Every structure is written in structure tokens, then in C-alpha cells.
Image (cartoon, coloured by chain):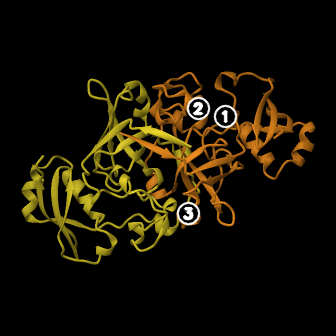
Chain colours: A orange, B yellow
């Protein structure tokens, strides 16, 4: 009753650390990524027809926490971090087999002469994530019309307003297109753990798309204090 | 870039052969099954909170065809069996890593003193399917409102009318509750391969919930000719 998985590809994304990575797809539309296929799965034929789909499922590995194993119960951050749920009633990464599941927006296919892959957006995937399967999203099979999640699960997370300090304008102007939206959408979700949500004025750092971003939360929402390209 | 999966449980279902098993979940509401959890995953705590969910994702293995490996392109039966699609643009079981993904209706939890597990319905899972993960279905994350599949993928399959020959009445009366609905919903989908869809009057057999069911298709739809409990 065991099986071996081989990664068909790997994610290249601007989320280089768990902190700040959206906890579900669909929350940060500005988040773009590439799925690079690996031999022998990098054949254009294996993608034929996929260009017609708006969204795809990715089955992937929670590689950053794989070594930490699973626990029967978890405390999901969206339930405030103080309520224990069964691991199978959660989307926690600390689960048997460490498999993740996300529906992400397909922006296009990468085909020869480029190395084969997918251009993705609106995702929640850490850089370096190994991918084990791609499946087309089929609304008729994948979205049961009468499905209900409990209220605590179902709520779309709140978003805070995000403003940029005067000092970060030059860095924003120098950053690639889409970077400002990525910062705005990521920080609007307040990536801090639930037990820090009451704290105001304390600076935090998050790495996004090759930049170190410093920010804090106050009564008015999120203020971005500093943006610095990271040394490579 | 590889990982080992261990089955957290196994499916016990009335679909004991690939022929006749629905090709997607949600097509045969009368199909019930049990997911039996295996040690060390059979802890009630691991399921805590799941009872509030109407549907769950199952990540499973296509065990019946695992030995046959993958191919870069496939001919999905729903596209008539004559159009080649990339394997990653299909839900074909002949895929790298042989992983399946289905959202199924959760009817209840099995908890001690019973062995731990899930009671499921509306599924498409073969008896003996190894399951690698259970995740709650979260409409806000799993059903992108603007998702579109190409027309050929998106259509809900047609259903044929199903009638029962006089000779099968006693067997139907003796079968367990729900069996008639299971037969009706399964055969309405016409499980024959696309290249046989034009044939009328040819008898076929399918095994369902411990019964051998003989049937044929004619101008009026499906006629069930014979129902016989199988020797165990």
C-alpha cells in the first residue's frame, strides 16, 4: 500500500519563504509563477489541449515542512490558531504524505524553443515546490453545486488597506511590473500569525520576488516601510 | 525530487471492476462507499471537525492500471475516444505518478467502537483504491468563480433512460436498499466505450455491488436483462 512519486516539475515563484506566502490560491491575483517541467515529462504533447483551460489543479509536495512529519490535530491559522482540528479536516501542510492541492490560474503554456512548462498566476506556491501532477479544472466535476463548508472555513479572509511610505517610492519605481500589486495583495492578507494580530507598530520583514520588504500594521492598516532588492 | 506515499486508507465500494465505474464523481449519487482508515491514521482526532463538511477531496492511486504506466497523450472516452489530448489536459488514469483526485459527498464519520473511516456517496472509486489524503472541500478556495473548461470538457454527460425487464423484478426486490438506483444511475451513463455506442441490442455485463448485471442498449435506452448475486 505504498507508492513512489517522482516530481514532474518544479515551481519557480516569488514566494521564497513560508512567511507571507498566501495560505490558499486565489488570494493574490498578482502572484505569478512558472511550473518548469522535468524530463521525461517536458514533452509538448503532454500539454496538448491544456491551453483551453482557464485553471488547473496542481498536486504538489509541501517540501519546506516535509521533514517535520504529520500530527493528528492541527491549529489552523484561519481559525485564530487556538482551535484544534483533525489534520484531515484541515488544509495544513503538516499531513500524512505531505501532499498539497491547489487550483491555480493558467496564463499560458511554455513550449519549445523555451523549456516546457506552465505560466501560472493567483497561486499560493513556494519557490522550489515539487509538482507531482497537473489536471484540468473541470467545473462540472470539481465544484459540487450543493457543497458547503462550515462557516469558519468558508469565510474569505479579510483584507487590510495597504499604503506605501514615501521612502519606498524609488524602490517601487525600479521594481518589475506587477511587484507593487504583489506586495499590496500579499500584505493586505496580514501574514502575521493570529497571536500577533493585536500588535500595532511592530516592524516585520517578508521576502517577495527577490526583495526584502519591511512593513508594520497600525490602526490604518498596513504600512510598507522599506523595500530592498536582495543580493543573489 | 521523489517522495514515498503510504496509503492512509482503502476504499470499499460496490464498483469492483473498471467497466461501469463512473468516470467522474457526482454522476451516480446512489454510489456509496466506505473509506477505511489504516493504522496509524485511524485516530478519531485526525477527523475532528470534518463532520461539518458536506464534501471532501480524496487523493488516491489509480491502482488498477498502475502497472501500465503513463503516456504523453491519451484519448479520453468523453471526447469520443478518437481525439488525442495531452495527459496533463486530461483526467485519464494513465498518468505520471498515477494520482487521482475526486470530490465526493461525505455522509458521515465512522468512529469507535467501529473502525475509523468515512461514509461516502456520489463517488467514482473502484473497490480497493488506496487513499493518500483527505482534505475538506472549501468552496472559496476550490471553486474559482471565473473558471472555464473548454466546451468538450465541460458538458455534463448525457443520460439514457433505463428500464428493467420483467425477469429481473425478483432479484431487484431481494437486493439491498439503493441497489436499483445504483444500477439505474450507472447504466444511464452508458459505460460502453465510444466505439460501441452505435451498436444496439448487444448484451453487456457489469458487476455492481456484488451482482452481475446484464443489459443492452436499444432505441429506447438501456434495458436491464438479468441480475444475479455473485458468488463470494
Label 2: which secondary element: helix
**Few, some or many residues within 10 Å of mark 1 (<14, 14–19, 20+):** some
**Few, some or many residues within 10 Å of mark 3 (<14, 14–19, 20+):** many
Q: Residue at x 58, y 37 (%)?
A: A63
Mark closer to the chain start, 2 or 3: 3
The residue tagged 2 is A65
Residue A124, compared with residue B39, is above or below; it is below
Q: Is residue A219 visible?
A: no
The residue tagged 1 is A18
The answer to the question of whether label 1 and label 2 lie on touching residues, with beta carbons closer than 8 A, is yes
Q: Position of residue A215 (x, y in %)?
A: 81, 32
Q: Residue at x 76, y 34 (%)?
A: A206
**Few, some or many residues within 10 Å of mark 2 (<14, 14–19, 20+):** some
Residue A43, compared with residue A30, is above or below; it is below
The residue tagged 3 is A47
Residue B144, compared with residue B151, is above or below; it is above
Mark closer to the chain start, 1 or 2: 1
- A172 or B121: nearer the viewer: A172
Label 1: which secondary element: loop
Amino acid at each position: 500500500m505504498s507508492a513512489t512519486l517522482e516530481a514532474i516539475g518544479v515551481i519557480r515563484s516569488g514566494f521564497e519563504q513560508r512567511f507571507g506566502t498566501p495560505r490558499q490560491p486565489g488570494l493574490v491575483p498578482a502572484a505569478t509563477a512558472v511550473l518548469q517541467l522535468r524530463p521525461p515529462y517536458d514533452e509538448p504533447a503532454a500539454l496538448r489541449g491544456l491551453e483551453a483551460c482557464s485553471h488547473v489543479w496542481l498536486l504538489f509536495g509541501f517540501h519546506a515542512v516535509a521533514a517535520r512529519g504529520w500530527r493528528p490535530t492541527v491549529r489552523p491559522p484561519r481559525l485564530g490558531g487556538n482551535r484544534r482540528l483533525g489534520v484531515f479536516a484541515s488544509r495544513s501542510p503538516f499531513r500524512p504524505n505531505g501532499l498539497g492541492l491547489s487550483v491555480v490560474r493558467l496564463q499560458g503554456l511554455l513550449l519549445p524553443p523555451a523549456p516546457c512548462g506552465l505560466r501560472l498566476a493567483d497561486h499560493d506556491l513556494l519557490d522550489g515546490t515539487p509538482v507531482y501532477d497537473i489536471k484540468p479544472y473541470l467545473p462540472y466535476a470539481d465544484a459540487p453545486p450543493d457543497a458547503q463548508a462550515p462557516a469558519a472555513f468558508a469565510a474569505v479572509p479579510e483584507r487590510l488597506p495597504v499604503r506605501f511610505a514615501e521612502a519606498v517610492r524609488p524602490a517601487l519605481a525600479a521594481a518589475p511590473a506587477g511587484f507593487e500589486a504583489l506586495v499590496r495583495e500579499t500584505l493586505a492578507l496580514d501574514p502575521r500569525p493570529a497571536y500577533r494580530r493585536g500588535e500595532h507598530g511592530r516592524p516585520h520583514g517578508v521576502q517577495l520576488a527577490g526583495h526584502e520588504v519591511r512593513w508594520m500594521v497600525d490602526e490604518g492598516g498596513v504600512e510598507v516601510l522599506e523595500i530592498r532588492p536582495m543580493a543573489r
